[in-house]
Amino acid sequence: MHKTHVGLMFALVIMLMPGGLWAEEDASTTKLDEVVVIGTRTPHAVKDSPVETVLITREDIEQSNAQTVSDLVKTVPGFSVGGNDDIFGGSSSRARLRGLSFNNGYGLILIDGQRIHGSSQSGAHGEYAVGLNQIPVSMIERIEIVKGPSSVLYGSDAMAGVINIITKKVPEKAVAGAGVKYGWYKVSKGKNYYTDAVTTPTDYGSNRYTRTAYAYTGSKINEDMGFLLHYTHEDSEGTSLSPYENDRDSVMGKLDVDFTDTAKGWMKGELSNFKRETTSTTEEESYRISAGFDFKVSQNHQFMLKGYHYVDDFSTSTRSGDIGFDQGELQYTWYAPANHVVTSGIEFQRQSIDYIMDNSSSGTTTRTTVVEDVDTFSIFLQDEWTLFEKLVLVPGIRYDNHSTFGDSFNPKLSAMYRLTEATTLRASVGKSFKSPTIRQLYYDVPFYHSPFWISSNPDLEPEESIGYSLSIEHTMLDDRLITSLAYFRNDVDNMVVTDRTGQTYEGADLYIYENVEEAMVQGIEVTAQFYLNDNCSVLFGYTYTDSEDESTGNELTYTPTHSFTITPAYEYVPWGLGISGTIQYNSDQYTDDDNTRVQDAHVVVDGKLFKRVGQVSKLTLEVDNIFDSDKGNDRYQRTGRTITLGLDMEF
């Protein structure tokens, strides 16, 4: 065996040893007692949340090799991101949760509880889809994930679930930090999707680079006011046939104010500038600003008022325009007698788009234009009712008035029953709806999607689903072993697909968006988290997924039947030396609706080594895709082995 392979196998054996979280506290207890909000809009420890919620902590983020959000969630059972590369500027369009695609609007992404849209800089398709990689990993404090239909609290696009990316909080004392990463990787050959001709990168065999630098500072201004400022720069040379520059600069700011013991306010903002240099230039500027006010009338009555404004302005050689999103919300929480917690609220959302796209085919150029405002007014009501200290019922209902589709009612019932102190049952059933995307509804003329044209359809109906889930969680060994088993199912009606019209447009086939399909996704998820001691852990996740497009009998795309991850970690505290890794397997999955193209089963192994230097610094060596897997698909240029060196400091 080649010496390099011997060394890599040795590293893998080491990584398979029992490992540990890096927190100096008891890691398992810390994780179970972490507070989450997203599932019910009220705070709960993870172990007490009546809605199935997954938490990725800051310690988990530091333990991982992830350079992007899409790579962070790959170890969560139910997520499929095997079609993505963990590189800034790469695509995140194939991310799926329980078989339903984020790129097609089935999953809702929040940043600090606020909806986001776009964008090319996140690895999505800009004007109509949402990518996971909205903000740099260095800005993230934790990620909360609710699986299953969540329209009752969050409205449209929450059919598969909700991801809430929570940014770093304002510190209680003065703090400053900085970090840098430098990585290099090679890009593989690919094949033309239509002709199967081999495509070779112009720099094949040569290294490309990726870099990240960040700095932050925060402090209390006085005993009632504090701030945080965070800056990140990211760049890479992408994964296309020729290297190209991807650059993003992001600045985030937060201000917290305690007006009185019962009244608190906050402001948050982020400005991001993205640029991609290929044969043409893609430029994108986005900013978001939000403000809120929390008022506790009494111990049992609390109000929350917040507003949000977001703009994403983008320009390429063929596309330009902007997307906006505005939201206002009032929420009231009543800790009522007889163990009830009633949460109600009203919300107004407006999504705006002003966009043009130039299409060229067979020497003909057409221009697609869309100028549209989509308004939604909502009222929601939820009751958390605790019975006998062991049973919690959470019924809820949401009313939405959509400016295009009118009225919609979406109920949900969740329940949690604590069989014993160590065993918890959770179940839920709920209705969700999803409005068609901007591209599916509102473009005035067909747009070119090589090698055919696609027409929007203003007569589309919204998609609806009924989702079910049932899970059991059990802890052993003083909470050092946490296991769970879950069953899920989603039945989706009126799924929107592209359908052949039998006609041509500008010399090529014409397709149209239509409500022609029903889809079913069901499966089983298994999770085990073993904490040998404060510094040693092994995490395991497995998902079985059965998916079907019921109009054709075919499986849904990019949905592997079997997938699992193993994440071991270990730190030897006396030396400040640690090692961690991830082994991920995905079975065969189809890449087209006709089930004629297959992404083969594959294994990807990542590893990370770190050394603490003194009290303020940490050096890291990260190796992604150690064995240079093509991730089962030779049709696209993929990143092979990626090596990254890093230095982090906090003062």
Image: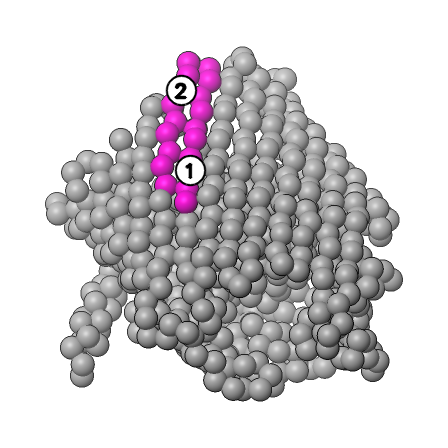
- Identity of the residue furthest to the front in this view: 363
Which amino acid, mark 2? Answer: Lys
Q: Is residue 223 magenta?
A: yes
Q: Earlier in the sequence, mark 2 or mark 1?
A: 2
Question: Bounds of the magenta span?
Answer: 214-233
Query: What amino acid is at disc 1?
Result: Tyr
Q: Position of residue 321 (x, y in %)?
A: 69, 49
Tell me what residue is drawn at x 77 percent, y 65 percent: 366
Residue 1, horizontal then vertical, whole percent: 18, 83
Indicate whether 579 appears above or below 285: below
Quarter occupied by residue 579? bottom left
Q: Is residue 424 left or right of residue 500?
A: left
Crowd band around label 2 with a 10 angstrom C-alpha radius: few (<14), some (14–19), many (20+): some
User: How far across and how far down the image is residue 24, in percent?
Assistant: 25, 41
Residue topped by disc 1:
231
Q: Secondary structure at mark 1?
A: strand
Q: Is residue 130 visible?
A: no
Asked whether residue 432 appears in the rendered view, the answer is: yes
Image mark for residue 183:
none
The answer to which image quadrant residue 385 occupies is top right
Q: Residue at x 73, y 77 (%)?
A: 362
Q: Position of residue 646 (x, y in %)?
A: 27, 50
Give the residue displayed 63% in from the left and 69% down from the top: 521
Q: Which mark is residue 220?
A: 2
Q: Rounded to the nearest whole Å, what is the CA distance between mark 2 and mark 1?
A: 19 Å
Observer-nearest of 474 and 629: 629
